[in-house]
Amino acid sequence: MQTLAQNLTSQAVDASLSQLILTLADTSKAISQAVRHGALAGVLGATEQENVQGETQKKLDIITNEMLKDALKADGTVRGLASEEEDHVVEVSETGQYLVCFDPLDGSSNIDINSLVGTIFSVLPAPTGELSEASFLQQGRAQLAAGYVLYGPSTMLALTTGRGVQMFTLNPETNEYLLTQDAVSISKDTAEFAINMSNQRFWEAPMQTYIADLLLGKIGPREKSFNMRWIAAMVGDVHRVLSRGGLFTYPADNKDPNKPFKLRLMYEANPMALLVEQAGGKASTGYENILDIQPEQIHQRVAVILGSANEVDACLSYHGLDYSQEPDPELG
Ligand code: AFP
């Protein structure tokens, strides 16, 4: 089995990008250790602090954020970074080629119940000139690499550098990531969806009707039964979609009119959308492809509908968009 470093070489990934990916992977090994020790390392529980999102920070949110910041500052290839846990972008060096956006511990509300959590990262090219928040506001299609680490029964790294999606599993004996899937492919159809049903009364009408039709099963317009899952950690739900297909959505809702969306574009939706598209799936807000969004703010939030291509199309048809007739790219 190839190690991560061997796979990056065999994929002819640029040497400096490979170095950055290996730095992120090495840091995830240390995060995995901290997560696995849980209460024994005194890393559970919340702090008195709130992040820019207005969320109470867990101890591990802060610990993992510092671990990633320290590693990226020492890497030498990074110009700047943006984190869910940082109010503003952070300048790292004047010469680095890359910008890194990350959610150091996605699903941190799962930490204290020993459920799935992960790290999500997105690598963008660093533009020339002064670094500011505007330097980061690039469309998702500009990403040079994207991935996540899922701290589950096994620690797994999902990665794309634009050459499809590869999955690596951390060998606990050698502490090496080994290639366990070299060409992840999402099934076009599915009978499984993931959504937080408790928000149902707050969704827009198209999503209410779409989900209601899924729940009608064989007697409804879909004429088949669907299963539902909800992990409350995007990394876990997206990993399931990459592993066995499915539709994951966190749609717009009017529960808090000041915050109609939940998931963050730069370090949740964009990296996950690139992974899903590279694995043959689709990722939309319900009205536009996520990777085409022109970001306006580093912590901006968006609606997300992603997964099996035909099921995303079905959901979009309820939103008045009929992608099923999309011109075949092969025909030019
Ligand atoms: P936390 O990191 O605050 O736990 O949020 C995780 C998340 O951003 C995303 O990973 C989940 O899909 C979503 O929130 C879960 O949201 P609900 O708690 O509303 O189900």
Image (spheres, rainbow, N blue to C red):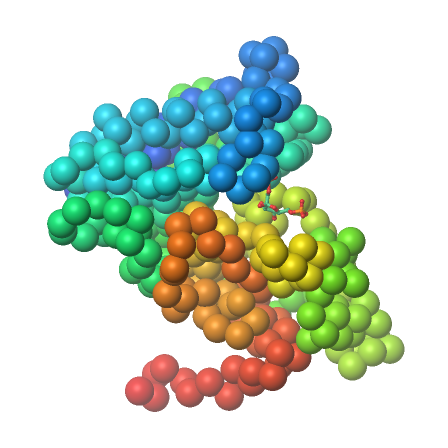
| Residue 34 image position (x, y, % from top left) | 51, 20
| Residue 28 image position (x, y, % from top left) | 42, 30
**Residue furthest right as drawn:** 219
| Residue 195 image position (x, y, % from top left) | 69, 57
Is residue 14 among what the camera can see? no
**Is 165 left or right of 313, judged from the image as shown?**
left
The residue lying toward the viewer, choosing from 67 and 300, is 300
The residue lying toward the viewer, choosing from 104 and 53, is 53
Is residue 286 among what the camera can see? yes
**Residue furthest front as drawn:** 258
62 is higher (above) or lower (below) than 42: below
| Residue 55 image position (x, y, % from top left) | 59, 37
Image quadrant for the C terminus? bottom left
Identity of the residue drawn at 56% across and 62% down: 303
225 is higher (above) or lower (below) than 159: below
**Is 200 left or right of 145, judged from the image as shown?**
right
Identity of the residue drawn at 42% across and 87% down: 327
- Label count reads 0
**Is 56 left or right of 121, judged from the image as shown?**
right
Identity of the residue drawn at 74% across and 62% down: 202
Identity of the residue drawn at 55% across and 32% down: 50
Q: Which quadrant of the figure shows ligand 1?
A: top right
195 is higher (above) or lower (below) than 44: below
Image quadrant for the N terminus? top left
